[in-house]
Image (tube, grey):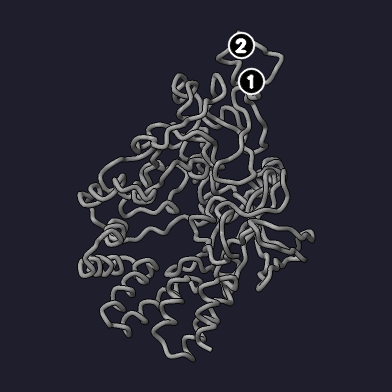
């Protein structure tokens, strides 16, 4: 059987000779500046989430530890978060620089009782900030050096791999979103600007396999609550626009490119509004100012982003704690996808859907095993998960716990060591393994873990107990 080679990514530098003006303009945009290596950061001393920090050069220090500041994430328009690399493994630092506030806790770190440095940066996290990633498969967050070959969102993120086009410009044209059918066109923007409440990969598919020209719904299903949660997320632009009265009325005629020029970041919103509302009131003012106001992002402490829901009036506060059921905004909703979505949100409604799910593949079995009260049945499911995904860290750690509870400590230790091979900063794997090893080996395991995450109170306590 003849195997066809996948088209190669060649990088934005290959586009410049034929598209010099577009390349020069795009290089100034926020998307083009959304990631990169760090050489030095302005010195600072500050407190975030009750912890004291100091930034000097490219190093973050705090009582009891230190970490290098190796890469940044974010254009800087609202803020920048930072990553550190150790032994090729990539982690997010717990502090972010916000334009409106300065240094403070990164999103999700606001209430941490300790300084945590073990949040892994997996390829899905990095995908929408950097280009031509180099993940090492079989691990959770290890990359080749460097972890990405091109900083920022590169040309090929929206136009597809350019290897064939560079060799034969006329015979192998690049993907052009403006010339695509509406669903494929909108998918180009949605790949990075649609958050929803849950994103579930289709059976046998991976989000990272999407290429411009494809339908994103062939790869993933996005779910939102039937009663829309109030507030703006960092990347909720597509879902908010989809729920707006303007989008529902205009249909496919209204899309991201109606208002935004991705090559220059030019804003054409006012002209777009007046094209439908020629008799609009207060034309001497900006339509966006009232109907698309900036709002604090609910998932980023101090970031402010444009509300794309295009409201007639400011949104009224929603007092209800329940937001109904999940509904598919994009993609296919079935027992498998909606069960995994509820499980991702820790909603008890997941179980009956997961029991009916077809296929009962690794993601389904992993969730069912976590909900299973019978240790033997849970162990069988974890075994099946590891048959499909040998490096699944959750299955490795949890199956190890079941083995250890049954007295199979040697088998448990082997699983926990495999988990640490996928990500050496897995606290559960390190602590569990240290409990079943002789003191010298346990000390080595804990020392290695603390070299990644020196602020861990549990690991420090376990290390002291060995003395």
Is residue 262 shown left or right of residue 46? left
Q: Who's the residue at 54% across and 48% down the image? A: 157
In the displayed structure, 242 sits above or below 447; it is above
State if disc 2 and disc 1 touch (CB < 8 Å): yes
Under circle 1, the secondary element is helix
| On-image quarter of the N terminus | bottom left
Q: Which residue is mark 2?
A: 280
Q: CA distance from mark 1 to mark 2?
A: 9 Å
Q: Position of residue 5 (x, y in %)?
A: 41, 59
Task: Of the two numbered discs 1 and 2 on the same chain, state the one appearing first in sequence.
Answer: 2
Q: Which residue is mark 1?
A: 287
Q: Position of residue 170 (x, y in %)?
A: 53, 43
Q: Who's the residue at 49% across and 82% down the image? A: 445
Across the whole image, how many numbered discs are drawn on residues?
2
Is residue 248 shown left or right of residue 260? left
Q: Position of residue 320 (x, y in %)?
A: 42, 33
């Amino acid at each position: 059987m003849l195997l066809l080679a996948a088209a190669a990514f060649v990088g934005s530098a290959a586009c410049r000779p034929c598209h010099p003006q577009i390349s020069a303009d795009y290089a100034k945009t926020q998307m083009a500046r959304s990631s990169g290596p760090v050489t030095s950061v302005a010195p600072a001393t500050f407190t975030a989430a009750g912890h004291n920090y100091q930034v000097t050069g490219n190093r973050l220090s705090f009582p009891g530890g230190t970490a290098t500041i190796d890469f940044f994430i974010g254009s800087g328009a609202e803020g920048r978060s930072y990553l550190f690399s150790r032994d090729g493994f990539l982690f997010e630092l717990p502090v972010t620089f916000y334009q409106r506030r300065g240094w403070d806790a990164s999103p999700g770190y606001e209430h941490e009782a300790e300084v945590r440095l073990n949040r892994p940066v997996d390829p899905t996290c990095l995908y929408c900030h950097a280009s031509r990633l180099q993940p090492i498969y079989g691990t959770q967050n290890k990359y080749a050096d460097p972890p990405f070959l091109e900083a920022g969102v590169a040309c090929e993120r929206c136009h597809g791999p350019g290897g064939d086009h560079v060799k034969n410009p006329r015979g192998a044209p690049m993907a052009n979103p403006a010339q695509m059918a509406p669903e494929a066109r909108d998918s180009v923007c949605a790949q990075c600007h649609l958050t929803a409440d849950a994103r579930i990969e289709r059976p046998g598919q991976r989000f990272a396999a999407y290429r411009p020209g494809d339908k994103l719904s062939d790869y993933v299903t996005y779910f939102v609550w039937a009663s829309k949660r109030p507030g703006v997320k960092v990347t909720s632009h597509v879902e908010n626009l989809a729920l707006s009265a303007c989008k529902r009325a205009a249909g496919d005629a209204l899309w991201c490119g109606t208002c935004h020029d991705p090559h220059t970041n030019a804003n054409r919103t006012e002209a777009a509004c007046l094209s439908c509302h020629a008799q609009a009131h207060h034309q001497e003012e900006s339509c966006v100012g009232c109907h698309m106001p900036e709002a604090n992002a609910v998932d980023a402490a101090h970031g402010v982003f444009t509300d794309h829901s295009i409201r007639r009036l400011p949104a009224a506060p929603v007092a209800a704690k329940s937001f109904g059921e999940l509904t598919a905004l994009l993609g296919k909703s079935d027992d498998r996808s909606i069960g995994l979505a509820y499980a991702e949100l820790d909603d008890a409604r997941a179980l009956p859907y997961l029991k009916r799910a077809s296929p009962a593949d690794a993601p389904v079995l992993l969730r069912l095993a976590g909900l299973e009260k019978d240790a033997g049945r849970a162990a069988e499911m974890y075994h099946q998960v590891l048959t499909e995904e040998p490096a699944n860290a959750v299955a490795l750690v949890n199956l190890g716990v079941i083995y250890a509870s049954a007295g199979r400590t040697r088998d448990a230790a082997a699983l926990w060591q495999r988990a640490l091979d996928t990500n050496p900063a897995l606290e559960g794997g390190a602590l569990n393994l240290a409990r079943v090893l002789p003191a010298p080996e346990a000390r080595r395991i804990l020392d290695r873990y603390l070299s990644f995450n020196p602020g861990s109170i549990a690991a420090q306590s376990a290390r002291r107990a060995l003395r």
